[in-house]
Amino acid sequence: MFVGAVFFPLLGASIAGFFGRWIGDRAAQLATVICMVLAAACGLTAFWQVALGHSSQTIEILTFVDVGGLEVSWALRYDTLSAVMVGMVTLISTLIHIYSVGYMSHDPSRPRFFAYLSLFTFMMLMLVTADNLVQLFFGWEGVGLASYLLIGFWYEKESACAAAMKAFIVNRVGDLFFMLGLALTFWTFGSVEFSTIFGSIDQHMDATFAGFRAYEVIGVLLFLGACGKSAQLGLHTWLPDAMEGPTPVSALIHAATMVTAGVFLVARMSPVFEYAPTALAVVTVVGASTALFAATIGCVQNDIKRIIAYSTCSQLGYMFFAAGVGAYQGAIFHLFTHAFFKALLFLGAGSVIHAMSDEQDIRKMGGIWKKIPVTYAVMWIGSLALAGVPYFAGYYSKDFVLEAAFAAHSGVGTYAFWCGIAAAFLTAFYSWRLIILTFHGTPRADHHTMEHVHESPAVMLVPLLVLAAGAVLTGAVFAPDFIGHHWEEFWRGAIVNAPHNEIMHHVHEVPEWVPLLPTVVGLSGIALAYILYMLAPSIPGKLASTFGGVYRFLLNKWYFDELYDAIFVRPTRALARVLWQTGDATIIDGVPNGAAALAADVARGAVRLQTGRVASYAFTMIAGLAVFVTMLAFGAAR
Amino acid sequence: MNWILALPELVLALSGLAILGIGVLPKRNTHFACAMAAVGAFLLAAALAIGAPEGSAFGGQIVSDAFTRFAKVLILIGAAAGVVLSLDYNAREGLDRFEYPVLLVFATLGMLVMVSANDLMSLYIGLELLSLSLYVVAAFNRDDERSAEAGLKYFVLGALASGLLLYGSSLTYGFTGTTNFDRIADALSDPSKASSGLVVGMVFVIVGLAFKVSAVPFHMWTPDVYEGAPTPVTAFFAAAPKVAAIGLFARVLGGPFGDLAGQWQQVIVLISLLSMVLGAFAAIGQSNIKRLMAYSSIGHVGYALVGLAAASEAGMRGLLVYMAIYLLMNLGAFAVLVAMRRQGRAVERVEDLAGLARTDLSMAVWMAIFMFSMAGIPPLAGFFGKMFVFKAAIDAGLWTLAIVGVLSSVVSAFYYLRIVKVMFFDEPAGALDPRPASVSFVMAASGVFTTLFFLYPAPLVAAAQAAVAALLG
């Protein structure tokens, strides 16, 4: 069963990928969906047994690498942390597979799509069940590959190819740091197995690397790796562009699962991070900054998917600063609830796009809520959960995260708290901006499109409803286990809080205004959006023209892409051009060409010696003789 | 006096006279019969050479050992193949006169005497017998201007080389008091006795021999003679006499002058370097394929001399193996050249091979094998020849020689591969005439050896090893 949860998706991917052409589109779809349903059944059972039934275990499969002191095996580590992830990933992936059957029904290469999707799921499961850092890295790279393939799924679109490459390259930057961190871990602990590393934390406490404590360096390196995958400030630029992929992909990979791998990594390595306070401070500051930064951009974007993408970026920031202040449980809990409501929002957006004949610009929507009531309702639910309105899932996790930041009582914690509060206000604002512009007001789409607006088929609506239920319920149901009074017996050491870290207790002792504040700012954000876009729709335009500089700064995403273009891309291209024209064309090509030309010249000269006259031949012979005799005469004299 | 040791030579001498007699008497054309008789004589002599006992005879004038056995068998194979290749060509070109096989028999006799010589006098007699025969066959197509010119050039320059050799021999005699190889070796066993006059004499001898193997700078006759002489004559030139002269080189430098290795090594290194480089570069611009093969053979002699320059047992062995392989693959390549006729006329330009793969695939494939082998591409025989000599050079510390050798074989690969390219990728220049069975036989035998040598190289290497052991005592 534990093995099945991981390997059923691989089976499905293999069937659809290798045999899709022979068995046809429908059979390939069916095979992957059935495999995913089986995986979900296994995954949920595992979640039930391991997380709720308290029975961790590790399943050895094969030895992967055994070289010198490095021994790596394929093993599935099932503790609460991975069980939570496995249950969540298999469930959401299954729902998205089902949704895709409807969403992709007009696409000509469906077997490929489903093969990639299942492959991704397998890789993600390998990542979360890894028993050692190398296996984790395998899954890490695997999801990167699947992400690349799926972003570029419509490879005939140039923008999709560019986005896929961008995602891959930016991720490689992060991966480099991950690899360095991995190497340093092996260097410090002499092992990459989690059990060995966590068991010998005390022994290497004073190890240093290049003058710094090894734990700090490992922590920072691994976090930089996580930044790439989880689109944190600096390495976030690929995520909005990744929306070029089909919408179910955005929902699965770029909202619910893959982008949270970084958070998972930090939680998984919590025993090391606990003794790396500087690294944790870095995590907190970067996470908090990302939360606020991405939210500001989300407020002015016009593409429905990009708004949600920046929202994802922002929410990942919340998770990181929760982990940064030591409340890994809160981070994972927010990850868990976020997966439901963000997948819901993306799939809802997909449903809107489907209804609007592939239109993604919210300025060209409006007035369609009566025509697609189910989508409208689930978008409300998702937004309510995202904004942290009480009793929806996001309320529990987000409040906990903010309380933890406050309860840290440290400089970075306070910074994170206020960033988080500001971001919460902006989150509510842009969520309702999206809802109002998309569904309300006068229709701004053309007549033809409006006539075709229709509710999605049942195969798409059912996953939406399931996710909506999750977005409503997961918070209230699981809060006591994840972060409430039962947290210690729920996690059972899957996440380690060092003895000096008592944040899980302090969280419950914050002043009364702290838990209220997020709700208040959330509601005021909603109110502001209502006023600006519902009651006085002329104001936003005026604001945009009055504060043109700020507006353009936000609209252009703080000019990150332009900055990177100037700092990295152009110098690299210039260097590449120099290497191409000077290095390759002139030197590398020039040497053989020059040698060939030289050979031709020498050949011409050698032929010229051959005059055809016997006298000159005889002269050459005598001259040669004279040279040899002279040579030896001098040799003999020596 | 143990004349049994000279039995192969005696058989050839008597056969030559007999064939001459048979050829003169009848009225009709006896070319074919004489040629067959010559081939028979070669085979008989080869059988006798294999079975010959060891020892020296005629007052130490000649010697018979594993080395002479090895060299004689190669020479006789080369000579027999040379006669076979000429059969059809001579008939078509009107050169089917009985003197041709007779001359080849006497030339071969000269070669056998050369390699079994144990005295500077018998050496000279063998060499001169060979040379005089070759001067005549080079000009055998006497109505053709180029052939006559080739014969004359070869004669004039050959006479000069003979003079140099004789002068060197007389200097050697003057400083050691003997012409016998063993005696010379004894005299030189104390190198301090090696006067500069003796060294000069040795250089003259080397020059005389270098002319025969056409090593740079004594190669100038080669392209002109190869191009001018009838193609089967060129094939003969490029095969057996090369082996004989190289064998003689090994005999003279390894035997009597063995203790002067430090001196002659410098000369041989230089000759070898120049030959490899010139052979590689000068062939690039050639459009006449016989001229191209002339430069190719100069280059191959350079590679073979790398083994001699190493002046070690491994080097000598490499030299002998190289020559054996060179002889056989060269015969195959020349078989293709002999077969190049279009509408009854011999053609000899590289472009005439264009598109051969489409008109005569099997010949194109054989030729490609010979060319790849000459370029030294594994697993063909030519690769192993080069490998043995380069390895010996490296073991002897002659890095320059090995590196230049490898680089020049890269350059020479250009013109070998150009022929392959012309045959396989160029537009056909029209079909060649059907080739005679005799030529196809030589081509196929040589091709099979070249291709499959790598499977079972042991017999050849072992024979060469035994020969070297006999040579270096």
Image: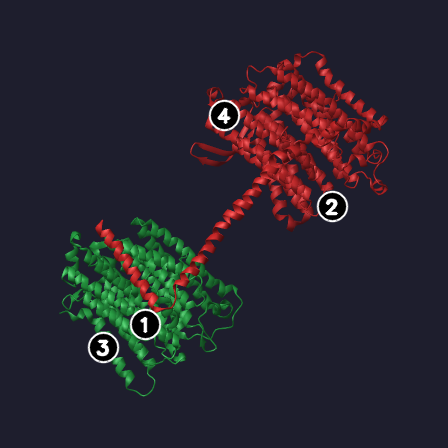
Chain colours: A red, B green
Of the residues tagged 3 and 4, which is closer to the observer? Answer: 3
Judging from the image, mark 3 belongs to the subunit labelled B
* Marks 1 and 4 share the same chain: no
x, y percent for residue B359: 50, 70
Could you say which is closer to the camera, residue A490 or residue B310? B310
Q: Which residue is mark 3?
A: B14
Kind of residue at badge 2: His
Q: Does the residue at mark 3 contact the one at mark 2 (Cβ under 8 Å)?
A: no
Q: Secondary structure at mark 3?
A: helix
Determine the residue positioned at 40% across, 56% down.
B409
Q: Which residue is mark 2?
A: A106
Q: Quadrant of residue A454?
A: top right
Which numbered disc flags the more N-terminal residue, 3 or 1?
Answer: 3
x, y percent for residue A415: 65, 18
* Marks 3 and 1 share the same chain: yes
Q: CA distance from mark 3 to mark 2?
A: 96 Å
Label 3 crowd (10 A; few <14 / some 14-19 / many >=20):
few
Q: Is residue B220 left or right of residue A90?
A: left
Q: Which residue is mark 4?
A: A197
Q: Which residue is mark 1?
A: B80
Q: Secondary structure at mark 1?
A: helix
Q: Does the residue at mark 4 contact the one at mark 2 (Cβ under 8 Å)?
A: no
Could you say which is closer to the camera, residue A631 or residue B379? A631
Image height of B404 relative to B329, above or below: above
x, y percent for residue B408: 39, 55
Quarter holding the N terminus of chain B is bottom left
Of the residues tagged 1 and 4, which is closer to the observer? Answer: 1
Q: Is residue A381 left or right of residue A574?
A: right
Q: Quadrant of residue A171?
A: top right
Q: CA distance from mark 3 to mark 1?
A: 17 Å
Q: Does the residue at mark 3 contact the one at mark 4 (Cβ under 8 Å)?
A: no
